[in-house]
Image (cartoon, rainbow, N blue to C red):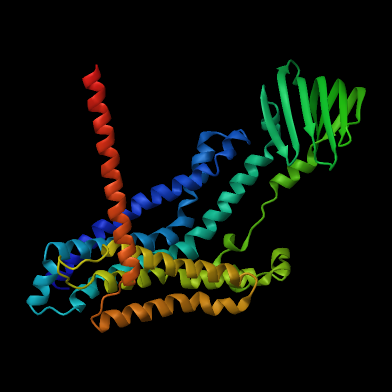
Amino acid sequence: MKVVERYIMRRALAVFLAALIWTLAIVWTTQVLARIDLVTDSGQSALTFFEVAALIIPSIIPIVVPFALVVAVAQTLSAMNSDSELAVLNAAGASRWTIVRPIMLLALAASVLSFAVDNGVDPYARQKNRQLVASSRADLLSLIIQEGTFRKIDDGLFLQIGERLPDNRLGGIFVADSREEGVNLIYYAKTGAIIENGDEKVLMMNDGVIHRETLTGDLSVIRFTSYAFDLSAFMSASSDVLLLPKDRTTQYLLNPSPNDKAFQKKPNRYLAELNQRFSEWSYSLVFALIALAVAGDARSHREARIHPLITAIAIALFVRWLGFFAAGKADNVPQYAYMVYGVPIVASAVATWFIVSNRTMELPVAWADWMTNFAGRFSDGWSAIKLRFARRGASGQGAG
């Protein structure tokens, strides 16, 4: 590899790693916040929460890596053009492939990383994640006996324990049950206890009342001496680990078990997931080609055009949206599998044509003019707002 090629790769790699870390951090944070209920609803420790959060990372790496790469390539080449480095390379007689080679080597490494994570690490991380979530929600006893907590046991079923009494008894038991359509049941008992008999677990409530209310407003109150509330069904349902096609290994997707009930119901989902895994890795190469087609040529600073980074990201987003659209449709319509592979192939071919023919891939002129005018109006409006606030501040100080 030539000195110039190593220089380009080193710069692009530095920007790629920085963009990858920050993008991963943002996406990971949004995914983690969606799972905060594991602590609030299931009463689990922070250690379990962070373990689940760490297992999310492999699932977002294949999606984030191509976008980090397109940002790195477009930004690196744009900066080199601003510093007139691309113009110097052209003047020195360097071929355009001097720029293409290091970028494509970096893209190939990113594709290998995406393929390894998507087909090797991610399925096992997803399975471990589901096992942790299922085991945390199946630990119903530790969930129930916490004092002063109002917990969701099932859809439409909530329970609260007022206090823990000696001899493992519970005090101030409150149960709200609205699972049956048109009927709301509220149980209140002064004392109670959890009775275990093998796999059966029953909440025995003593000295309480049941409020039964219908949609018509009829209310009935039943007083009881003792009442048994079966919890076994909820515990067994919570402990079952449901594995979706995304959670299965690639080897399993290639040869799924005929006894798999999910496969029997919707076999197309398994094939669609397999096609997505075998095509998703290629987007790093596709996005690198798009960035090269957009920002890989030397351009004069006097030429009015949208920043190459914005153009590259806009085209990449559109291509990736087509890929997600095809993958989503392939779950129900197998013919969309051709589009799953066709989108990256066609996008690569178009970008390669721009590179080979020494053309620049740009947004339509009308779009560029609209975005430029919008940016100018926004800048003028922001300047006017700042000037208005500055005048108000000056008049306020004068009045003081």
On the question of residue 222 being in view, the answer is: yes
Q: Quadrant of the C terminus?
A: top left
Q: Which of 385 and 155 is in front in this view?
A: 385
> Looking at this view, is 365 or 254 the one in front?
365
Give percent across and percent down for residue 4: 13, 69
In the picture, measured across the screen, residue 332 lies left or right of residue 278, that is right
Residue that appears at 60% across and 79% down: 335
Residue 395, how many percent across, how many down? Answer: 24, 25
Instruction: Classify residue 154 as left or right of residue 253.
Output: right
Instruction: Please state, as top left, top right, bottom left or bottom right, where the N terminus lies in the image.
Output: bottom left
Which residue corresponds to the image point at 86% horizontal and 21% vertical from the top-left?
206
Could you say where residue 237 lies in the image, as x and y percent from the top left? Answer: 74, 47
Q: Is residue 173 or residue 240 the one in the foreground? A: 173
Q: Position of residue 67 (x, y in %)?
A: 37, 61
In this orientation, does residue 363 appear?
no
Above or below residue 41? Residue 86 is below
> Which residue does the image show at 52% across and 54% down from the upper left?
125
Number of on-image labels = 0
Q: Which residue is drawn at 87% across and 22% down?
A: 209
